[in-house]
Image (cartoon, coloured by chain):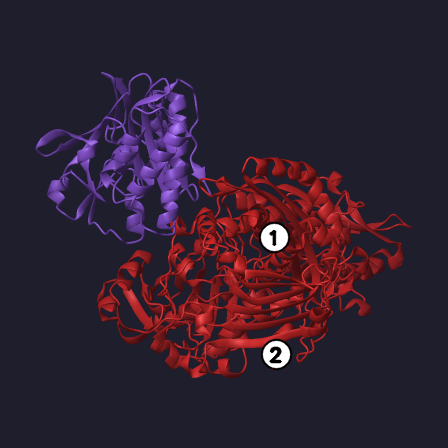
Chain colours: A purple, B red
Amino acid sequence: MLGQLGENAKFLAGGQSLIPLLKLRFANPEHLVDLNFIAGTSFIKQEAGALHFGAMSRHAEIEHSALARKISVLHDCAAGIADVQVRNRGTIGGSLAEADPSGDWASALITLDTAVHCLGRNGGRTIHLSDFIKDAYTTALAHDELVTEVEVKIPPKGSGGAYLAFKRSAPVYPSASVAVQLTMAGDVCQDAAIALGCVGLTAIRATNAETALRGQILNDKTISAAAEEARAAADPQPDMRGSAEYKRQLVVALLKRAIQIAVRRARGEQVEGAHLYA
Amino acid sequence: MVEEKEKKNGGRWVGASLPRKEEDRLLRGRGKFADDIKLREMTYLRFVRSSYAHARIISVDTSAAEALPGVVCTITGKEIAAQTHPFIEIAPDHIQKVRDYPMAVEKVRYQGEPVAAVVAESASLADDAAELVQVEYEPLEPAINAEEALLDKSILHEEAGTNRVWSGTWEFGDVEKAFRDAAYVVTIDHMHFHRFSSTPLENNVVIGQWEPKEDRIHYWCNNSFPSFAIQFLAAHLAVHFDRIRVQTADIGGSFGIKITSYPQMSVCALASKKAGGRPVKWVETRSEHMVSSAHGNERTFRDTRVALDKNGVITAIASRHIDDCGAYPRYEPLGCVIYSQVFCGTYRFKNARIEFTQTVTNKCPVGPNRGYSRMQHLWFLERVVDICAYEIGIPADEMRLRNYIRPEEFPYTTPNGCVYDSGNYPKMLEVAKKLIGWDDWKKKQAEARQQGRWIGIGIGTTLDSGTNNFGQSQIINPYAPFSGNSQGANCKLDVYGEVVVAVGSCPQGQGHETVSAQVVADVLNISPDLITVRTGFDTERNVHTGFSGTYASQFAVSGLSAVHGAAQKLKAEMKRLAAFVLQTTQDDLEFGVGEQGPEIKARSTGKSINYWSLANIVNVNSAVLSEELQDVTLNCRYIWRAPFKVPDREKKYGNLTLTYSSQLHIAVVEVDRDTFIPRILDYVAVDDCGVAINPAIVEGQVYGATAHGIGAALMETCAYDAVGNMLTSTFSDYTPITAMNIPKIKYGYISTPSPHTYSGAKGMGEGGAAPIHTISAALQDALFAEGVFINDSFNNGDSIFRSLQQREGGQLSNLVRMEKR
């Protein structure tokens, strides 16, 4: 349908990005194709060691899903997006397809083995999340293609994760966010995935910070070393959410905290990760 | 139905925490607001706004917009200038030459200034058409920073010849001698109070109709000071006062901002005239509100010197204050004198010299915002007190006790002649310290410091001066034709004996219907349920005076004094009438409620007459009235006038406000060592507004004012870049405080009744922005040991992080110096 309507048409999912753009007259499409109320697009299920989310699953549905709690990063992320109103409307598929540099989902999911299932006129395809997000507001989706499902592999036992963001107030985008997924063997970090949100054109994988943790006993020193690598990896723009230097500092503070939570979760502890507010 | 048992205050309704009469309507979404008003043939207006902070307008082409189907007309600044007079300026001399119109004519002077307007059949058509208006600009050098603007490198209003709006010096006592005799002299180079907005939930709304046949203008709007707006509009539009009718409905917050919507009111009327008399509705968007309503005054404090004796008692303060009023002075420069209502804050010092200068800049015009012009000054004084205390080594609480005006000194005359009616600041401190657990927190703070944590405990003492003496405007401009203050009210028995009260206020949730009914209920000894109160301004209701509206913490004083006066007048008439009907003396009469409703009874005979019968005699059975009762109308208008004199314009001396509520807040704040985010760990707000007419409403206002202040202190700032682009035009950028950011507030109160009001009540509501002073104090307490000087009223994780970074360069400590003699 979008193909027939041409370039001046847009999909409307939860509308939490598109509606504000329309309101501010930054976007002015002639047609909106409403994806709401299409049967079978909103679901959360576990299959073959992975969680599957229908593209139209609302953030709030994921926040309150017992299944989604199996992957801490998912629950942390869903529960912290904007405010209740936004979480009740916004969708995981819509958020990924929008690829806003400040969006929460991409930075959270990129630390996990995440596949995005897409559907277009020429049939379906599956794109790994790291190939899906191309640039700010740019994905691998063709104009008439949409996300149908997000598939996230459940991390192995002994792996723990956390997603933390700092927001100046509930409804706004974070100033910075950090996602961590650690695989631990005792005090030694066997594997680490670290992503930084809102501090670049896309979510940034802090690979040097990951390297700094891999094979190390996690203590104040090794955690600080990784946090400093993350500070260097961040490439933030100054704006009302913070100066560039401060956003880098937030990355350091959030990463330290997220690693500590992830380590405890890897040990099987129940830890509530809470987003930080002003 | 309200219960008799609520009458706790000596058997009176005044003092009872009654639920608001308005509650049902407002909380169930049944309020009627200006945007709810739909009129036949209504049209919708959208402004075209400047994208530049400072630019010459080369051309405005509205042809494409006019060609769009559904567009009724367009109107430009030039068209308006051709048919109106410039707005009155309150500032004297060169500012009288400023040609201030409701839309830009030759130049734009701030980003968001209206340049043209489009009127269409629907709001969305107006939006579409506004985008088709082509404006060509020639950019000019912007003046963004106040102190740079005063250098006049780029002048906003060429006709005035300078950016300086007004300057004056307040000097009292012997400042030089105090500095000669001082044991300590503390110097503070630079402090800054930031620009923010009180962001009411409902934006500005105007519906204007220029009724062609009658040649009169009818407004429905949410302006919060219509009497004032009409005075500005009448001269500007050259229309007689009584041909401008203003009606307001429920209003969703103003905090002073909606006082200054008269430029938009002008445009709606003129657009209506051009549209053949069709009503024109303008509903402001949030972004428009953020870029172009009325921000709060931004102020810089330079070269502050403080003299203290050996005990840390402040003997003199000298300072230069530079106020930034944005692009147009308009209601300003009243802020230049309003600050002096609280000239010495809560302190006893007698010698002071404040050199006050106001300038225009290429930013949104400022206007009254909750705490207007006094909060800036009170913040300044509280910073001075804390910094001096630290430099000399006196604890912050002890420092205040040594400097506070003492309870036995009230009524206290300040160095500039203001009379503080009552107060007890040491008592408030005691109550607040007890509520917060002062000693416990001091202990915890010391332990936390050992662990390297940054915890600060701060005190903020502040004043909420209410019921202005408008004569203070003559200190700014000796020709200003204003003085004193007045409010009107009407109290009547309707034809069927219903008690109906009308007041000249336009409340925004303050509960005027409830408190007015409480006052009248006590006068007539009936239940507030039996009293109907009509609020909301309506020129044709004829109860307003030139000062009517709802602003400046005064309704409990001016509004209720007028209501009380009108009720007394009605009662006197009812007595005369009842004595005649019941054939007895007035002394024999008793007011109360009988089997047939509210009535007046003769104690001697037991005979009574109810309100319906009384009203009936006057209105529809008047043949029975005796000759001497012919003047009775049972429809009584009363004008209350505040007992003010015109201040001494030269000496800047005189009583500027009638009542002084006081607030004392204590905050415990921790700054996170990693994120630098300040977090409030504990918070106490203690209030003294004399006799509270309705304590529940007072408490609610304290919470609201506290939330506003916390938001301003930690989250909210109106930011501009170097060329005058506004960076906070949406709530996503501005981040107004939400429930998520408000800590639990522990509320306490004391009551020192005002001797200046009939009821002992004082105006309250603005709250003196106590949290801004208090949070600055707590942050300063947390970071003194780190060598960080809190010299700005706005602090967040980012600014604290940067202050700590800069400190390593050794910059900040140079801004404060102490000299011991």
Q: Residue furthest front?
A: B821
From the top left corner, tell me how far across and down residue B658 is, in percent: 71, 64
Which residue is more in the foreground, B178 or B105?
A: B178
- Using residue A53 as the reference point, say whether residue B727 is left or right of it: right
Which subunit holds the residue at mark 2? B
Query: Is disc 2 placed on a helix, strand or loop?
Result: loop
Which residue is more in the foreground, B112 or B721?
A: B721
Query: Is disc 1 placed on a helix, strand or loop?
Result: helix
Residue type, label 1: Ala
Count of numbered circles on the image: 2
Query: Residue A91: in sight, yes or no?
Result: no
From the top left corner, tell me how far across and down residue A147 is, in percent: 20, 33
Query: Residue B723: in sight, yes or no?
Result: yes
Residue at screen point 72% across, 70% down: B178
Residue at screen point 42% across, 66% down: B363
- Using residue A141 as the reference point, say whether residue B3 is left or right of it: right
Inter-mark Cα distance, 2 to 1: 33 Å
Picture disc at residue B723? none
From the top left corner, tell me how far across and down residue A218 is, in percent: 37, 26
Which subunit holds the residue at mark 1? B
Asked if badges 2 and 1 are on one and the same chain, I answer yes
Picture disc at residue B770? 1
Q: Relative to B663, say whether A35 is above or below.
A: above
Residue type, label 2: Pro
Q: Quadrant of residue B112?
A: bottom left
The residue that label 2 is drawn on is: B481
